[in-house]
Image (cartoon, rainbow, N blue to C red):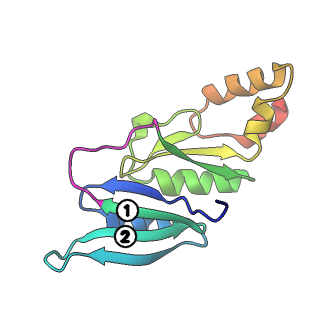
Amino acid sequence: MPNCIITTNLWFNGNAEEAANHYISIFENSSVTQVHRFPSSPTPSAVSFTLNNAPFVAINGGEGIRFTPAVSFQVECDTQEEVDYYWERLGEGGDEKKRAAGWLVDRYGVSWQISPRGLGTTMGEEGGEKAAKVAEAILGMTKIDLATLEKLR
């Protein structure tokens, strides 16, 4: 079944439209594709949107379900400028205490990993010496510093 589409659904407590608009303001090739409303409520029940052409739905599901770091979105960056941009934009208004090793939690409680492109390849190299040095360096960082990691590769 090669033509299936996998859509990420995110559960919010009344601010799904705000969150979708926030995210599309950050990523290129992103837009709100549909706002779903019940006739009896001015608040959308859900908002369909894309982030860099990947489909998402933000659901106003109510209280009781919260985001955890058990699920996160990884943003792979080619340059320090990209790392800085996504770190600042996604981290704006988020929990400053929940930032470590390139991970952050945004203002809605969603976890993001802002990482260098190709990190998985480096971490999976045979022998593991480079991977261990890179991992140790990352664990000592809050926001990723690409220049430091490049010296270790």
Residue pictured at 47% horizontal, 50% vertical: 91
Q: Is residue 153 left or right of residue 35?
A: right
Q: Is residue 145 visible?
A: yes
Residue nearest the observer in this picture, 63 or 23: 63
Q: Is residue 13 left or right of residue 147?
A: left
Task: From this view, report whether residue 141 is shown above or below residue 39.
Answer: above
Q: In terms of sequence position, does the residue under pointer 2 or pointer 1 come before the other?
A: 2
Q: Which residues are magenta?
A: 60-70
Residue nearest the observer in this picture, 26 or 62: 62
**Residue 80 at what x, y percent from top left?**
70, 50
**Secondary structure found at label 2:** strand
Q: Is residue 13 magenta?
A: no
**Residue 76 at what x, y percent from top left?**
67, 50
Does the residue at mark 2 contact the one at mark 1 (Cβ under 8 Å)?
yes
Task: From this view, report whether residue 52 is shown above or below residue 41.
Answer: above
Residue pictured at 22% horizontal, 72% vertical: 43
Q: Quickly name the residue at label 2.
A: 47
Residue type at mark 2 is Val
Q: Is residue 32 left or right of residue 131?
A: left
- Spatial CA distance of label 2 from label 1 is 5 Å
Q: Is residue 21 visible?
A: no
Q: Quadrant of residue 65?
A: top left
Q: Quadrant of the N terminus?
A: bottom right
Task: From this view, report whether residue 129 is shown above or below residue 94.
Answer: above
Q: Quickly name the residue at label 1.
A: 58
Residue type at mark 1 is Ala
Q: Is residue 63 magenta?
A: yes
Residue pictured at 69% horizontal, 26% vertical: 135
**Residue 68 at what x, y percent from top left?**
39, 38
Q: Main secondary structure of the magenta part?
A: loop
Q: Residue furthest front?
A: 1
